[in-house]
Amino acid sequence: MMKTKTEKDDYESCQSTINPSEWKGRTIEIDDAGTGDLVGNAFIGFRDTNTGKIIFQSVPVGLYNEDNKNEDQPKKHILKVVIKALRMLNHSEGDRILLCRGNCFDLVREYFDENKIYYEPAIVEGVLQDAVEGRFIQHLRKLGVRSHNLTMDSGIQRYFLLFNWVCRDFPNRESYVKTGFPSWKKKWRKIAMDRYHNSKRSKIQRREIIERRANEIYQNMFEKPLSLVKATSEGR
């Protein structure tokens, strides 16, 4: 029996994918990674629990710019890749879908309801969560994020690690930012620009100090021997 919308929205009705309820047919898990992170593409992961097969689909970072985000382009793209992946997995009527509760799947839930596709809201943990978060981390590494503190744990720590990475080379890294996030335009973009310019000025100042000190040492190398010669002559 199809669950009502109220039941689907009830947090306590969600089950964990680590220990899901019994199901006679096949179960397909769906989860996301990177949709709330400041930098990079997002990824949607699909897992057939019977075979262990996992599929990844990407959501390009460009869909998260201001114009596209206002028109729900990320959610529309996610719906497309969900339909595509379910076809790849040969989804059938007897399957159960355990769908992450994230709001990035809002249009997916509407589509499932309209087409009477059975699904249950779930807290996706374990194999698929680790796999899709790992895929996102691989993507960030390819972009050039080298910090050893970058982990698969999403949240405020990873958000600011990525923010600081953007600040260090703002002109070249803003293109990797999900600029459609309201807080980016209202607050964080200016802070990132200021940090970049302040850092650049500090580097120039440090370079000037180093160069000035090097010149002083260079001059002393030539002045000191002459002083010694003069002192020796006077002693005689």
Image (spheres, rainbow, N blue to C red):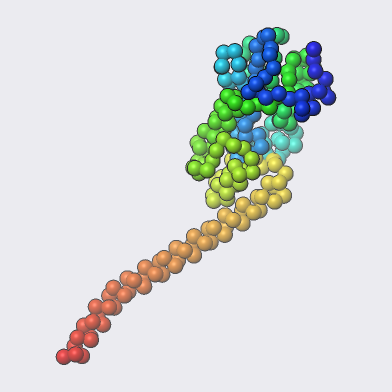
Is residue 196 visible in the rendered image? The answer is: yes
Q: Position of residue 189 (x, y in %)?
A: 65, 50
Number of disc labels: 0
Residue, x 59% and y 42% (percent of image)? Answer: 158
In the picture, the quarter occupied by the C terminus is bottom left
Residue, x 36% and y 73% (percent of image)? Answer: 216
Location of residue 145 with respect to 52 vertically, above or below = below
Left or right for 52, reference 84: left
Q: Position of residue 178 (x, y in %)?
A: 65, 40
In the picture, the quarter occupied by the N terminus is top right
Q: Going by the picture, which residue comes out furthest to the left?
A: 236
Residue 3 appears in which quarter of the rendering? Answer: top right
Residue, x 40% and y 66% (percent of image)? Answer: 211
Residue, x 50% and y 36% (percent of image)? Answer: 142
Is residue 170 visible in the rendered image? The answer is: no
Q: Position of residue 53 (x, y in %)?
A: 56, 17
Residue 231 appears in which quarter of the rendering? Answer: bottom left
Location of residue 217 with respect to 149 vertically, above or below = below
Q: Nearer the viewer, residue 94 or 56?
A: 94
Left or right for 4, reference 68: right
Left or right for 66, reference 158: right
Q: Position of residue 145 (x, y in %)?
A: 52, 42
